[in-house]
Image (tube, rainbow, N blue to C red):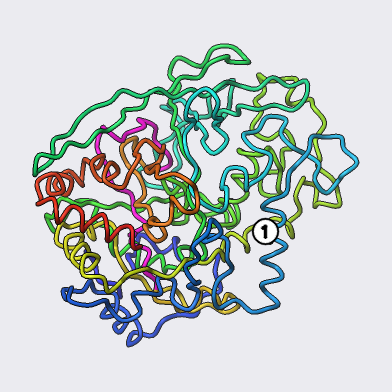
Amino acid sequence: MASLLAFPAWAEPLRDVHLPVIARTEDEAARIARIVKPTNDFGKAEKFEGNPAGAATVRARTDANAFSQASGNITFERELDFKVGNGLFRKLWVSSPSSTLASDGLGPLYNARSCQRCHLKDGRGHPPEGAEDSATSMLIRLSIPDETARMEEIEGYLASLPEPTYGGQMQDFGVAGIAAEALIKVTYAETEIPLSGGEVAHLRVPEYTLENLGYGPLHPQTMISPRVAPQMIGLGLLDAIPAADILARADPDDADGDGISGRAQIVWSMVHDQPMLGRFGMKAGQPSVLEQSAAAFRGDIGISTTLLPQGYGDCTAAQAGCRAAPDGNTDDHDGAEISDVGLDLVTFYSSNLGVPARRDVDDPQVLRGKEVFYGTGCTSCHTPKHVTHRLDGNPEQSFQLIWPYTDMLLHDMGQGLSDNRPEARASGQEWRTPPLWGIGLTQQVSGHTYFLHDGRARSLLEALLWHGGEAEAQKQQVIDMPPADRAALIRFLESL
């Protein structure tokens, strides 16, 4: 693992050009390196550990709105922008043409009518459970292999193409007169894993089918990737972690021999027209909250932006009726269906959803669970602490000590979790380490405890037992450890 003071020469173009960064001094960088070094004292909570988002931390509410609060350090004036952004995040879009021009442009194909419909209460989505449940908070990405296309600017780029008929994402709803693309169906097979102490865990192995295909058969080489909507908290803080700090933790050749070989995702930025570090999405396929928001508007709701201006959204040339349907692009909205101002407000809202304060940080079982978490090697990927950039104009995210428990890198999680679908530099078995802050509030906010990229895990223990690949050794330790330590580990995760 490289020094946090270093910035690899090959990564120079990946600097954080999208943020108003104030450069760190060498002394400041050295002090930060000491601060973020993992602890070896588990007798008490660390200083500031109860505030995972630094000054942006919010109080831990006991209701379903725990993830829907503005950053704790936001000013009154900027909170007004947050609330307007929240209104746009919750807005129900309608199909064109419509008399409500500010909400015009849904679809024609879509997964949900608003951002909030997928990210209900700004929390975690879930796969459909039974015939009466919908897949509104779950989507299916689509692509086919491309053996010829290359992106010369990005080394190791794994080229693929959208599925020729259905595009890059399966939309299971259509506006009036436009057939939906498919019905997403999930079935499960059960498998058992014996644990120490005579306990037995049950995992469910998902199988995905796309029924009632509205536009003919899929390409025979179609690759699919199911994704449930992730929680929304702390995104602006993750965006503000210096790229140099993330890249310094990458160890693609496992030079230190610990079995962990995190790799940086590198993607093309539409905004800056250059390669950038990928940060957002299950495989870190987007470089910023802004570009993630624009991509979600297009793929999930069918709403165009100046970055992705096609009013027909993800409709392909094979879907002639969809391409020909009216759209909501207007000059009043910068030639799109949501204006740059509107997109910026949604981005601001998404960047400033506060991270709730930790609970029970001094509880003896939580402290023991933390020791087990660290001792098992979980921090090799789930890096506890970072310090964000000093930022000019983004005070909520500026120079905060944060505890997201992620290295923001790609890791091979084994064949069991593979979707067998590459994305930019990520292979079919690689996923970005998800942040763990707020994970213990999932039941409270979202009404369920479904985890991992497709919601297959019904508990935190099941999520741990799905780990493989680089985390196979850690999973085996969880299986073999005394039941009391396993319970403490789960208790620690629930406190995050």
Residue placed farthest to the top in the image? Answer: 216
**Which span is picked out in magenta?**
402-424
Residue lying at 79% horizontally and 25% vertically, measured from the top left: 324
Query: Magenta part mainly helix, strand or loop?
Result: loop
Between 182 and 425, the one lying in front of the other is 182
Residue lying at 74% horizontally and 26% vertically, measured from the top left: 323
Residue placed farthest to the right in the image? Answer: 99
SS for dot 1 = helix
Q: Position of residue 397 (x, y in %)?
A: 51, 73
Q: Quadrant of the N terminus?
A: bottom left
Q: Position of residue 406 (x, y in %)?
A: 34, 59
**Residue 384 lies in the magenta stretch:** no
Left or right, residue 96 beside residue 183? right
Residue lying at 16% horizontally and 48% vertically, measured from the top left: 478
Q: Position of residue 144 (x, y in %)?
A: 46, 25
Between 163 and 139, the one lying in front of the other is 139
Task: Identify whether 100 is placed above or below 397.
Answer: above
Res 165 quadrant in image: top right
Question: Which residue carries the number 1 mark?
Answer: 86
Residue placed farthest to the bottom in the image? Answer: 27
Left or right, residue 195 beside residue 393? left
